[in-house]
Amino acid sequence: MPNLDRVQHESLEIGPLPIVRAFLDRLELDQLLEQYLPRRRLGREPKLAPGKALTAMIANIVIARRPLYGFREWARHFVPEHFGLEAEDVEGLNDDRLGRALDRMFGADRASLMTAVITRAVKTFEIDVKQLHCDTTTVTFSGAYEKQRDALTKDPPPVITFGHNKDHRPDLKQLVYALTVSADGAVPIHHKTYDGNTTDDQVHIETWSTLVEIVGHPRFLYVADSKLCTRENMTHIADRRGRFLTVLPATRSEYTTFCDALRQGLSVDWQEVRREPDPRGTDRDPIVYEAFEGDHSAEGYRVVWYRSSQKTRLDAHARTGRIEKAKRRLEALNDRVRPFKSEEAALQAAQAIVKDHHVERWLAVHVETHVGHEFKQTKSGRPSPKTRYRKTEIPFFVVTYEENGDAIEADARADGIFPLITNVKKDKLPPKQVLAKYKYQPNLEKRNEQLKSVYHVRPVLLHNPKRVTGLLFVYFLALLLWALIEREIRGAMKRHKIKMVPLYPELRDCQAPTTDGIFQALQGVRRHRLLDEKDQPLKTFYDKLSPAAEQCLELLGISFKPYGIEG
């Protein structure tokens, strides 16, 4: 019988770790990392394999997003075997060891590793890769990051430098993060990090070529924003039997020509291709999309024009708002403390305002000259009844404006317009499907938003750019895991005809469960053990799972055994 005075109580969290572990096993990520991570050239391999440290980092990112220096303290509160580790391994997960694991990740053939991981994911989870969406975002850094590129390095990391910052922080340096997802659950398929001053139009040829290697053929539909719409990019894809779909930017002559024709009264046979409820409320009018097959682009590709009822309202509202703001500023010119000294100065100030608000077509400004009078004493001294005065005329200038109703009415005819360009023929991709395929693009933007808001990707404490690149690749793998979990549970709900899962607070139903919502249902679930003086378990018991947690595990096909439930 054990000495009860020496019995210890151990309480460690299980949480959602078994889900993470199950999906890592299905991806065979441990084996792939073991295969592709480079070996040490000198000395013995560390006791804890770098691949295991990296998979533990992935678990940390998707569950808690703790910084590297706080990882070990966080991991101590969890059951270590669900990380794929032994208890003593957790104590070795300090920031130095994790940093060296990131060095290995940078030194690996990351392109081949990514291809192997994605190929495994596509095969295991039966992901449809017939349509792929690409977009870029920026990862912002603080710090100098000087002398990053070593001329002797064969594979230098991307340069953290200034560029067009999409976080609206032009004062900080950045990297450009390109991500491609499938149209089947927005599962990440490809990722690469570029120099911070790389423009978006420079990434598409390399991205598309890599996707061809991953998918195995060029016949998938490649969807991207307007930066894809360059002659070089589109020709590269089309000449290699690829298919693309993108937005025709407003800077193109085709856009200007068509909109000018609409303003001049061109009659267009618009055909309704889509109708959907307004997400802002059931009391609002539905959003209607109309399409028109226009002339081909200068390169010979299809241009399909669309008119959105929602965008029509927004364009009209934006134009009215700009005009009203300009009017208020023009009226404020007449209340200046210091009046204008000349008609030319007043006119220049008014023209600067209409130019600043881009309302030159809609507001015409004028300056009216008025004459005021001022009376001054003819002689100095204290005024008296006999003081004589001299009348002086003083000109002053009043700014007026006039709306150009004809121009406003003409521009309103082009409201709500946006064009899409593709090299897929109309019989294989009619206008209705062109619009439907492009409208999946916001799902990719949601993944980039998750990278920044959910994962809080800010590797600013890593002063080594190589480790930064390695860490961003780990974030890509975490994002892949996150997307697969969401896709699996939503697919299972559809197969079992389950419309809702009670994941929201107060057990409110959730129609589209997120990975974060699933993890919240399992957060805090613990394993308790009574240990003797030799740390041998005497008794093990577990916290009870909520009905929502049990339903999620069942839908995901996760064993209940890690939570102490047999069968």
Image (spheres, rainbow, N blue to C red):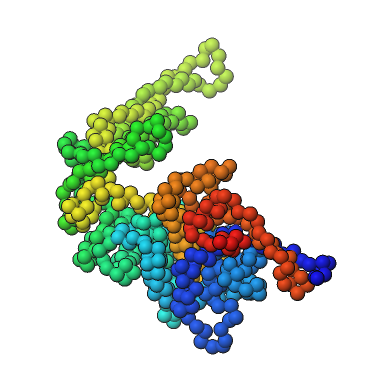
Q: Give the number of callouts.
A: 0
Rendered residue at 48%/21% (across/down): 376
Q: Does 300 sit left or right of 129 as displayed?
A: left
Asked if 92 appears above or below 371 in the picture, the reply is below
Q: Is residue 107 visible?
A: no
Residue 397 in percent (x, y) is at: 37, 28
Q: Is residue 313 visible?
A: yes
Asked if 562 appears above or below 169 in the picture, the reply is below
Picture quadrant of residue 210: bottom left
Q: Does 288 sit left or right of 12 as displayed?
A: left
Residue 33 in percent (x, y) is at: 48, 75
Nearer the observer, 125 or 554: 554
Nearer the observer, 538 or 478: 538
Nearer the observer, 132 or 95: 132
In the rendered image, the quadrant that contains the N terminus is bottom right
Nearer the observer, 253 or 380: 253
Residue 318 in percent (x, y) is at: 36, 37
In the rendered image, the quadrant that contains the C terminus is bottom right
Rendered residue at 51%/15% (across/down): 387
**Residue lying furthest front:** 567
